[in-house]
Image (cartoon, rainbow, N blue to C red):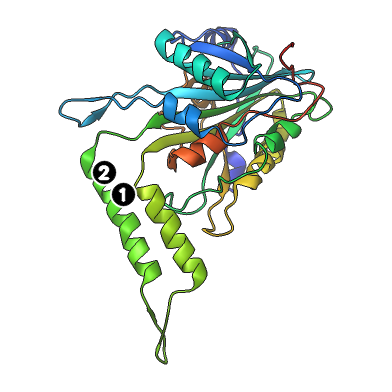
Amino acid sequence: MIDRLRYYTATPTEEEAERLRNPVQRCHSIEVRTPRNGDVPPVPVNLVKAVTELQSKWLGFVNTSPVAAFEIRRSHPDKIKIQFSVPTIRLGRKLRTHLTNQVPGIRFNTGVEGIPVTSEDTVGGGILTTGRNDWYPLKHDFDKPPINSVVSALHRHAMRDTKFVVQILFQPVIGKPLKRWYWRKRAYQRIGYLRKEKEKLWGSRSPTPREKRQADAIEEKAGTNRFYTSIRFLVIGADDYTQSRVKELSGGYNTFENPDTGQYLDTVTVKSLRENQILNFAETVAHRRFGSWSHRFQTSVPELAALLSLPSIEQENIVNAEP
């Protein structure tokens, strides 16, 4: 009964729509265009390492590392834009340099800010978060860029009446030493449980090969640099079909399910008892900040690199780089 009273979409006023289209906080956004038939790495690990900047203050208690964003935008069915947004020009130069090194023939354009919404549009969306505790890694070993499955769901004949913004925010994990210590402690407790003999009603048993693989995967993730990560969908103009659009788009991320660890990405549709909370979610996306609408989780460098992969498929609404 309560669920029927919740809002899944909101319709902004003209003033609210203007604020969403032109947020006060501006980033340096770079649209990327991959070469047709080019060699695109399926998991650009070196790119993630290159743009990682660990920064903190107040004796290491406060995380001041830059928050960056990777976005897939489809404001019109005939064109998909893929862009990175970073807070400084210097970080933008590093991004361009290392993308050029990893993807020869890549081209760059100026990216866009804000959200393509008008006062006649409905706004809604969803969030992806880990289905299990985030010390279990997602799948990150791919032969082809896993983002192909996401952009395939946004081909020009699919959901033509709807505009989309897929946003992945990421920030290095640093600061808050007690919180980081507690996360690692729980991860290593899980490792110990997976590797020890299990007591049964009659006797005991040794850990299975799958449990050993899970323990190794968790240990590898816990012992390396990690990133706070948030995956959000903004669905514009879908009205009563917003929930359906979120589920259809989130299906493209099923490829990240890890059969060894059992980790997967779970879909949470944004809903609230108050309509203005849906607009707050849209504003959080427009300003590229975590906020309360993030459901953030921790990823390792290979996991994040897989999430930030660039498409390698040919699709009519993907604009490739000119030779």
**Label 1: element kind:** helix
Write down the quadrant of residue 196 in the picture. Answer: bottom left
Q: Which disc is residue 183 wearing?
A: 1
> Which numbered circle lies on residue 179?
2
Residue 101 image position (x, y, % from top left):
55, 21
- Provide residue 73's location: percent of width, then percent of height: 65, 21
The residue carrying pointer 1 sits among few (fewer than 14), some (14 to 19) or many (20 or more) residues within 10 Å by Cα, namely some
Residue 310 disc label: none
Please give the count of numbered marks on the rendered protein: 2
Q: Looking at the picture, tell me which residue is in the foreground, 56 or 272.
A: 56
Q: Position of residue 253 (x, y in %)?
A: 63, 42
Where is 301 relative to 188, above or below? above
- Tell me the kind of residue under disc 2: Lys
Q: Is residue 289 visible?
A: no
Q: Are marks 2 and 1 in contact (CB under 8 Å)?
A: yes
Name the one closer to the observer, 286 or 29: 29
